[in-house]
Image (cartoon, rainbow, N blue to C red):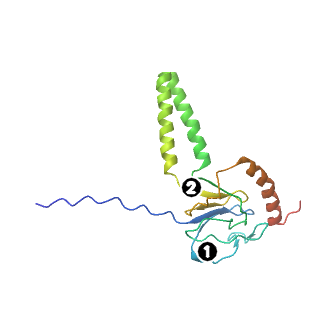
Amino acid sequence: MSTPSPPRPWPARKAAPSSVQYACPRCEEVFLRAVDAAAAAEHGLACSHCALELRGPEGPGAAPRPGQAVERCWICGSSALYVQKDFNRELGFMIVVASAMISFLVMLLVGPFEGMVCLGGIALADWLVYRKLADVTVCYLCQSIYRGLPLNEAHRGFYLGLEEKHKKLRQRWLRDLLGEGP
């Protein structure tokens, strides 16, 4: 008779690899670039698709170093960054709409109490998913997303007032970067 083997512990959760996701303003090609020692030695980036040199109004930002919080954006050099959960916004909106429709249908077909219970269950599931998602750092100016890096305590959540300010700055940055007149 063989003795049962002891239960294996859960494997340790791997840390997400550090990366930056950005889009080329000219060709709109999206890139996912690893943040490692080789990338940290580089200053500035160029699009590998259309060869556009990506730089900001204050020059190119320094590449983020693995294990260190982002101070300035690598793509545009901006220091205006915010923190958000790493979740697709369009998918989140579709989930909200579907949840509202489902709970409304349950209220109509079964009853108001059951519909509210359904809505509460959906809210609980949403909260559990929210707690599991990692935080990312996003640049207000070029919308680059930094994943797998420690958060900078100076960066807060999204603020609409700063986004409105950066819309105009983004348009000016794009005109300068692409060599278009005012």
Residue type beneath disc 2: Asp
Give residue 74's quadrant in the image.
Answer: bottom right
Q: How crowded is mark 2: few (under 14 residues within 10 Å), some or many (20 or more)?
A: some
Q: In the drawing, does residue 1 fall left or right of residue 121?
A: left
Q: Residue at x 50, y 43 (%)?
A: 127
Q: Position of residue 20 (x, y in %)?
A: 61, 64
Q: Where is residue 80 in the image (x, y as percent from the top left)?
A: 71, 59
Find the distance from the CA under tag 1 to the CA under tag 2: 22 Å
| Element type at mark 1 | helix
Question: Seen from this angle, which residue lies furthest left?
Answer: 1
Q: Position of residue 45 (x, y in %)?
A: 69, 72
User: Where's the N terminus, which quadrant?
Assistant: bottom left
Q: Residue at x 60, y 42 (%)?
A: 93
Residue type beneath disc 1: Ala
What residue sits right under mark 1 in the picture? 39
Question: How many numbered marks appear?
Answer: 2
Q: In the drawing, does residue 175 fall left or right of residue 5?
A: right
Q: Which residue is drawn at 66% across and 65% down?
A: 71
Question: Seen from this angle, which residue lies furthest front?
Answer: 153
Which sits earlier in the primary sequence, circle 1 or circle 2? 1
